[in-house]
Image (cartoon, rainbow, N blue to C red):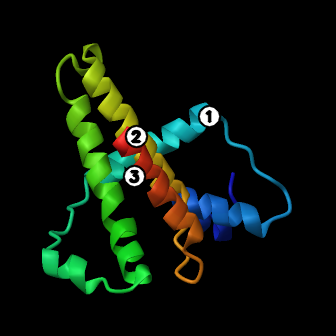
Amino acid sequence: FLVPRLRPFFRSLRGAARARRCFSAEVQVSQERLNEFLQAEVVFFAGREPKSITLRQILDAKTPEQAATLAYRELPIRYAQRILQIETLPGWQASQELVEVHRLYSENFKDIRLVELNLKELEPFTAVIGTIKGRMKE
């Protein structure tokens, strides 16, 4: 049971992390429960409409903060939609290649959803983007 005034903090994974930092008691979430939260987030983000991004918009993101905001807003939607597209393919789990792509996209989605975007301190977000880039090169 959550105290009513605390409920808004728990509407997202980042909100839960933010609320955890506000209180002295540490909250532990099992890996199974975290996976359930992430699957719910995949469904939520997959239902959102990605915004068309033009080359002009990418070039106009001249500062690291603008580029980070664009990536933070759009990447979860795109990863979530691709994850669900794979999951709708009959027999996808029998294809080693599809299982691997699904794993990569799921890890990327998890990483980007668990990092908090702080425009004054971009290092944690930049590190996640670096991890994603490295993972996709493999």
Q: Which mark is residue 133?
A: 3
Where does residue 15 sit, x and y in percent of width and height?
A: 58, 64
The amino acid beneath tag 1 is Gln
Label 2 and label 1: CA atoms lie apart by: 14 Å
Label 3 and label 2: CA atoms lie apart by: 14 Å
Looking at the image, which residue is at 42% across and 80% down?
64
Helix, strand or loop for disc 2: helix
Name the residue nearer the viewer: 55 or 109: 55
Where does residue 106 sit, x and y in percent of width and height?
A: 40, 40
Foreground mark, 3 or 2, reads: 3
Which sits earlier in the primary sequence, circle 3 or circle 2? 2
Quadrant hosting residue 24 = bottom right
**Residue 18 vertical position relative to residue 94 in the rendered view, above or below:** below
Residue picked out by circle 1: 31
Name the residue nearer the viewer: 17 or 52: 52
**Residue 41 vertical position relative to residue 83 in the rendered view, above or below:** below
Where does residue 130 sit, x and y in percent of width and height?
A: 47, 57
Where does residue 39 sit, x and y in percent of width and height?
A: 42, 40
**Residue 111 vertical position relative to residue 95 in the rendered view, above or below:** below
Q: In the rendered image, which quarter contains the C terminus? A: top left
Label 3 and label 1: CA atoms lie apart by: 24 Å
- Lateral position of residue 5 relative to residue 134, left or right: right
The amino acid beneath tag 2 is Ser
Looking at the image, which residue is at 31% across and 33% down?
101
Residue picked out by circle 2: 106
Helix, strand or loop for disc 3: helix
Instruction: Give yes or no for contact between labels 2 and 1 (Cβ–Cβ under 8 Å).
Output: no
Looking at the image, which residue is at 45% across and 59% down?
129
The amino acid beneath tag 3 is Lys
Which sits earlier in the primary sequence, circle 2 or circle 1? 1
Looking at the image, which residue is at 47% across and 47% down?
110
